[in-house]
Amino acid sequence: MPVKNHKSTGNYAVHVYGIKDGKQQFLKATSFSISAPTMEHMSAGEISSNESFRVELQGVSAVSGVQKVMVPVWSQKDQSDLVWYEAKKAASGTYYADVKLKNHQYNEGTYSIHAYVIDENGIQSFVGGIEKSVSKTAGNYSAEEKGDSWKMTLSDASVPGGIKSIKYAVWSEKNGQDDIVWYESEKKGGSYTAEVKLKNHKSLGTYIVHVYAENKAGKMIILQANTFSVQSPKAGNVEITSKDINKGTFTVKVSGITNSSAVREVLVPVWCAADQSDIKWYTASRQSDGSYEAEVNIKNHKYHAGTYTAHIYFKDITGDMNFEGSTSCEMLFKAGDLSVKDTDGTQKRYQASIKNAEIPGGAKEICFAVWSETGGQDDIVWYTAKNGTANIEIKNHKTAGKYNVHAYAVAPNGDMIFLKGTTFNVDAMPGASSVQASNIDGEKGTFNVKISDILAPAGVSKVEVPVWCAGDQSDIKWYTANKNSDGTYSVDVEVKNHKNHFGTYQVHAYVTMENGIRGFVGATTASISAKNYIAVETIDASTVKVTVYNPNSGNVESVEFPTWSETGGQDDIVWYQGTRNRDGSWSATISADKHQDGGKFITHVYANYQGQKIGIGAVSYNLVSGAAARVNKHVNNIYNQVGRDLNACYWWCVNNLSYQTLPIHVTPPAGYTRDQWYSIMAFEQHRGNCFVYAAAFYQLAKGLGYDAQYVEGQVGMAAGGYGPHGWVIIRMNGASYICDPEAQDEIGRYNFYMQPVGNTVLQYKW
């Protein structure tokens, strides 16, 4: 009976059965025992070259004989690295197996080692087991400061299978591992070194260092967990230096810095406005003594005046920024000293001056606002100072009394800053000892006013004499008096300037001094009665009203006004009959339409009384003829439409007139020249022949002041020969030009405006 068929050792039970007639029958029972293999001793040797260790099994035996010995080895609890090694038999009879660590991923820890014997019956039996500790050597770690970096060193370390590489996992304690960096090491001899750069991390303080060995299987094994500390830089002193208010600058200095090598940069935010709307961040510059300075200029802060606040932040080499202190600097306006003085004692000019003022950033300019108290600020004038001084001209204010002076600085940002105010007085007023009327002449309608012994401390600029006769002053006129050689001032008053009123005139006198202050200096009256006084009142350009007052002392039955134009003598004389007015005066209305010419007119006045024609007097004046007035009215209307432009007037004629055949030439009515009558046809009927076009443009050009000539001549005809034609010649700058609006209307493809004579489209003869 082969035992190998049962694959087990120990006690066996044997039952015997007989079979008869196909039936099985128990006959007898017995038993026997198969002994299990045995082992006397099992051991594990030292690890060789970090690669393997040997397991020895002594005294291995089996009753049926030993077929082979198997040694299973594992280091993981889940036996994931289980390897079965077949032991070899040495000459001494000892079995051994070499366990290779690489077969177990070079794991460290406790290795479990079992032994199994397979006898000649093929039965595998467990004969014993041991454990083997496979461990790492942490080695010796050190950290050394190297300015802005630290040197990490590990020596005398080992791991199962040997070290493939050493890595340092480093992070700052603040905010956990948010700045972890893995540093590769460099092997030198038996040591592994790495340089930890602080700039690779996010903060200073305590750093945590884990040292890992990478074994030959690529597995990371922690060897060390250590720390080192880097002190954050601190500011010893923060102060303001080099303050210059007028330049608008100051320096923020940070000194006494500890661990300055850890400082990447020093940032200085500075502001003046409460809401920090003018904040600017300055980067301070490192000085040779290790301090840092930031130059602050208030131009970077909208030139604000007030208290400037400066905070200090250190950005360390990790990029972490920390507040290190603050300071402040006063950049305030200083009003200075304001003074005003009368430079020459005449109260004409005062000098305002401000000294010792301080303006943060410097002033673009200094201004003085000056006004007299009388009437409020209705006479305020702003004076710009030069070198802090400005001259105040009293004539710009023209008021006596108390004056206010406010000094302002215009800051570089344009803000007006009030510095200081003061006052001064201008109290001198003009006077005169005498205002008299004389030389009263009722026939001429004149009298003289004289002002004597004028007193004017600031000098006399002018003397004004308001004169009126009407109770409501509706006929008032202000006269400017003339200075006489004797120092008096006088003015000639004419009643024609006062609506030809006669009666008692009120006369006042005012003196304006050279400082612009005007004062009342006296008054008088003058009574004047008319005597054969002749007045001319203009009604329009071609009509006047001639009135005689108190003719022949009132001894009058009728009054005649013979009138004629000076041109041609008395060939157009008209005797106008006068009409008596309510006040006893006599008037006649003279119209140029009733005469042949315009220009200078002469009117004589005769009073008829008791059969006698008594000559009262004569007067002359200028009138525009009726024709000219009619033309001028239309010309001005066209100017209002197109403007006072020669080209625009030319095109008005072209675009607003249409051609009409007319007799050549049309005879104008009495009082009109041919060019006047032709232009009236153009302006009022808007049609006519070439002479009408030309006359209209001629009147428009002449009214603009051009040297214009209306021409009635001949022009070359398409069929040959010449025909009558009208055009205008304009002379300017020594040259002559032809303008032909009718040809422009008829032959529009050519330009007939301002054609140089001798270079024209058509052939003109005149």
Image (cartoon, rainbow, N blue to C red):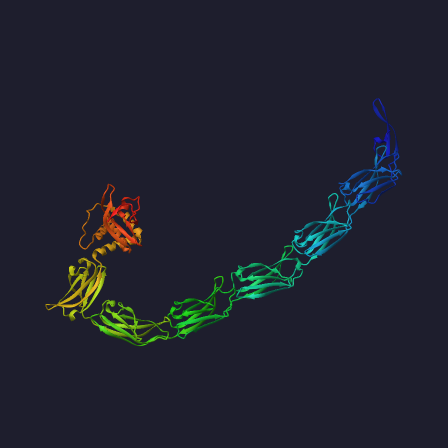
State the residue in front, 262 or 77: 262
Q: How many discs appear?
A: 0
Residue 607 figure quarter: bottom left
For the question of whether residue 469 can be seen, the reply is no
Quadrant containing the N terminus is top right
Image location of residue 618, percent across then percent down: 18, 66
Residue 346 figure quarter: bottom left
Which residue shows up at 70% across the image and 54% down it? 150
For the question of whether residue 464 can be seen, the reply is yes
Residue 66 figure quarter: top right
Image location of residue 670, percent across then percent down: 17, 54
State the residue in front, 476 or 210: 476
Give the residue at the far top of this rendering. 21
Q: Is residue 409 left or right of residue 110?
A: left
Q: Is residue 581 left or right of residue 485?
A: left
Q: Is residue 491 left or right of residue 66?
A: left
| 681 is higher (above) or lower (below) than 272 | above
Image location of residue 571, percent across then percent down: 15, 59
State the residue in front, 1 or 134: 134
Image location of residue 384, percent across then percent down: 44, 66
| 547 is higher (above) or lower (below) than 41 | below
